[in-house]
């Protein structure tokens, strides 16, 4: 169990806090932290990973204060930060072996664990290659492997699918679903589709504050009756994108099919449609997120 109690963070010289009175509790499963860039997601992840200290508030991991007892968190933590660095002269296997030793693994257990992780992230064929020659997506997969290396009970991953191709993104989502049992998994992203298949609960954050913490079904229920679809001329599209919260576009021979979020129909010939999680996210944010 992870319990966050009134976390706030104000960076020196900042006009407003990056995190403000943020509280929630998370149990077994995947908690998706969803919000736009600059919402405070990375700050929250860094505090929970004991990398950054908050201005006020605290968090408890299995009943122990994570700020006064950071080692109790680190022993059971797997962390993939948004900006993950590697030692470029090491091979993938050497790098994971090195990090495994830092986590307290050794001998045959370490070797087996490294091989398993390389297989999981589809890098077994490149295990002997130096990381300096890896693409951005391959480095991200190494980052995912190191986060899982110590079989963590608390897994924190910040924008883990950035740089991954569609096939690898699906592979990672499936992996998260498989390992979530018996773990608390924090998945921070601004990509709604990354959460649809894996998140048991979703926390929406905006301007450093918690807007909503609920199961995906609750977000969808709140969006019911507030999502519409209409066909418009291409020339009308720029104006509509400025004025409405557009969640989808489909080019057609007779114009553009626009999917949008609003309290009531705003375009002639609009018809209501079933909301997706992306629609629900726009509704939760008050329709403030524009297509741009």
Image (spheres, grey):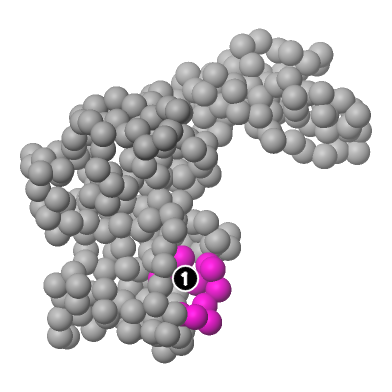
**Toward the viewer: 37 or 268?**
37
Check the picture and name the quadrant holding the C terminus. Answer: top right
Residue 129, x across and y down, in percent: 46, 87
Left/right of residue 285 with respect to residue 55 in the rendered view: right
**Image point (61%, 11%), residue name:** 263
**Image point (40%, 45%), residue name:** 42
How many numbered marks, from 0 up?
1
Residue 209 quadrant: top left
Residue 253, x across and y down, in percent: 91, 38
Left/right of residue 43 with respect to residue 277 in the rendered view: left
Is there any visible trace of residue 33 in the rendered image? no
- Can you name the residue that lies furthest to the front here? 13
The magenta stretch spans residue 3 = no
Magenta span: 131-142
In the rendered image, the vertical position of residue 231 relative to residue 108, given as above or below: above
Residue 282 quadrant: top right
Q: Which residue is mark 1?
A: 139
- Can you name the residue that lies furthest to the top here? 264
**Toward the viewer: 4 or 203?**
4
In the rendered image, the vertical position of residue 264 relative to residue 291, given as above or below: above
Is there any visible trace of residue 21 in the rendered image? yes
**Image point (26%, 38%), residue name:** 54
């Amino acid at each position: 169990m992870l319990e966050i109690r009134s976390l706030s963070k104000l960076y020196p010289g900042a006009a407003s806090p990056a995190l403000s009175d943020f509280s929630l509790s998370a149990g077994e499963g995947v908690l998706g932290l969803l919000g736009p860039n600059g919402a405070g997601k990375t700050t929250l992840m860094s505090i929970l990973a004991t990398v950054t200290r908050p201005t006020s508030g605290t968090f408890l991991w299995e009943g122990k204060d994570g700020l006064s007892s950071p080692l109790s968190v680190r022993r059971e933590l797997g962390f993939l930060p948004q900006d993950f660095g590697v030692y470029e002269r090491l091979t993938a296997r050497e790098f994971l072996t090195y990090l495994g030793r830092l986590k307290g693994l050794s001998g045959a257990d370490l070797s087996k664990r490294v091989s398993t992780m390389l297989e999981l992230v589809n890098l077994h064929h490149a295990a002997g290659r130096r990381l300096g020659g890896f693409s951005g997506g391959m480095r991200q997969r190494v980052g995912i492997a190191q986060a899982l290396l110590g079989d963590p009970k608390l897994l924190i991953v910040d924008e883990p699918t950035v740089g991954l191709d569609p096939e690898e993104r699906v592979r990672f989502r499936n992996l998260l679903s498989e390992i979530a049992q018996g773990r608390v998994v924090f998945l921070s992203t601004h990509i709604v589709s990354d959460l649809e298949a894996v998140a048991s609960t979703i926390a929406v954050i905006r301007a450093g504050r918690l807007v909503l913490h609920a199961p995906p079904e609750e977000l969808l229920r709140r969006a019911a009756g507030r999502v519409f679809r209409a066909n418009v001329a291409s020339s009308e599209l720029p104006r509509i994108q400025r004025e409405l919260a557009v969640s989808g576009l489909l080019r057609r021979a007779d114009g553009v099919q626009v999917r949008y979020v609003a309290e009531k129909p705003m375009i002639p010939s609009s018809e209501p449609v079933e909301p997706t999680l992306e629609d629900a996210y726009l509704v939760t944010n008050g329709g403030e997120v524009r297509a741009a």
